[in-house]
Amino acid sequence: MKLNQVTVTVDNMDAAIAFYERLGMTLIVHTHERYARFELPGGETFSLHLGDRPGTDGPALYFEVENVDTEYDRLRRAGIEFDTEPVTQSWLWREAWFSDPAGNRLCLYRAGENRRFPPWRKKG
């Protein structure tokens, strides 16, 4: 099984598209006002759906980058507001948290090998 894509609900499609383009995603589908799909630099896809219930009750989305501090600085210069500065967590991930215009929780992070193979991974 392979995860195909993630779709989040937004309440303002134009604001959401502008926000995710500032993150560096490329808009590849926007056929009507209720749906848009992006391609990330690695070829993965991510989409938006216009709906009534966006925000913090949904999933948190993690976007892994090579260097959290460099990307954090770049995005702040592009006008993205963060809730936290980059911090190395006890689970060995470096993270900086922020939200999209609809309130969806996003994390800019770097886990490297610790994403799948942390020192405490179960054997077997």
Image (tube, rainbow, N blue to C red):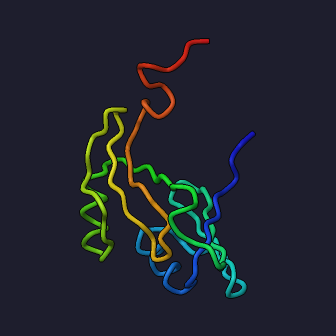
**In the current view of this chain or complex, which residue is farthest to the right?**
1
Q: Is residue 103 left or right of residue 11?
A: left
Name the quadrant containing residue 89: top left
In percent of width and height, residue 19 lies at: 45, 76
Residue positioned 62% across, 61% down in the render: 45
Q: Is residue 65 left or right of residue 38?
A: left
In percent of width and height, residue 29 lies at: 67, 76
Relative height, residue 98 to residue 15 (above, below): above
Residue positioned 50% across, 59% down in the render: 41
In this view, the residue in front, 122 or 72, is: 122
In this view, the residue in front, 57 or 91, is: 57
In this view, the residue in front, 76 or 84, is: 84
Q: Is residue 34 left or right of residue 41?
A: right
- The C terminus appears in which quarter of the rendering? top right
Residue positioned 45% across, 71% down in the render: 100
In percent of width and height, residue 43 lies at: 59, 56
- The N terminus appears in which quarter of the rendering? top right
Relative height, residue 22 to residue 110 (above, below): below
**In the current view of this chain or complex, which residue is farthest to the top?**
124
Residue positioned 66% across, 57% down in the render: 5
